[in-house]
Image: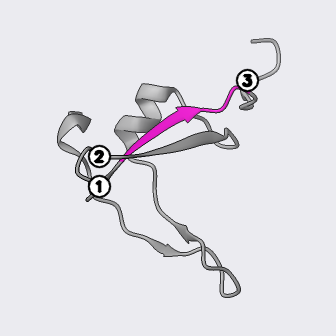
Amino acid sequence: MNMARGEPTKLTKANDSSYSLRTTVPKGIVKQLELKEGDSIFWELHPDKNGTGLKIIVTPSPERKTKKGKGK
């Protein structure tokens, strides 16, 4: 999967009493970062050179959980 070209996702309300929105993490990013359910990710926002857009950097949080089966 070529994520350099991007992949669209749709935003939905997190809940009725919040201004937060949710989206799906694309499969290519999940695979690239080896994310699992329950992991945390860290978002960094950097304005571009002309100030009209943002570069968003997403990295696995150092304290992310790793779910492994017993005995593995």
70 over 63 or under it: above or below: above
The amino acid marked with disc number 3 is Lys
Mark 3 surroundings within 10 Å by alpha-carbon count, few (fewer than 14), some (14 through 19), many (20 or more): few
First along the sequence among labels 3 and 2: 2
- The residue at which mark 2 appears reads as 48
Residue drawn at 61 percent across, 79 percent down? 19
The amino acid marked with disc number 2 is Asp
Q: Residue 21 versus residue 37: which sits nearer the camera?
A: 21
The amino acid marked with disc number 1 is Gly
Q: Residue furthest front?
A: 50
Q: Position of residue 8 (x, y in %)?
A: 27, 58
First to last magenta residue range: 55-62
Q: Are marks 2 and 1 in contact (CB under 8 Å)?
A: yes
Marks 3 and 1, how far apart at CA: 43 Å
Tag of residue 34: none
- The residue at which mark 1 appears reads as 51
- The residue at which mark 3 appears reads as 68
Q: Position of residue 47 (x, y in %)?
A: 36, 48
For label 2, the SS is loop
Q: Residue 71 versus residue 41: which sits nearer the camera?
A: 41
Q: Residue furthest top?
A: 72
Residue drawn at 23 percent across, 51 percent down? 50
Residue drawn at 71 percent across, 31 percent down? 64
Check if residue 43 falls in the magenta segment: no
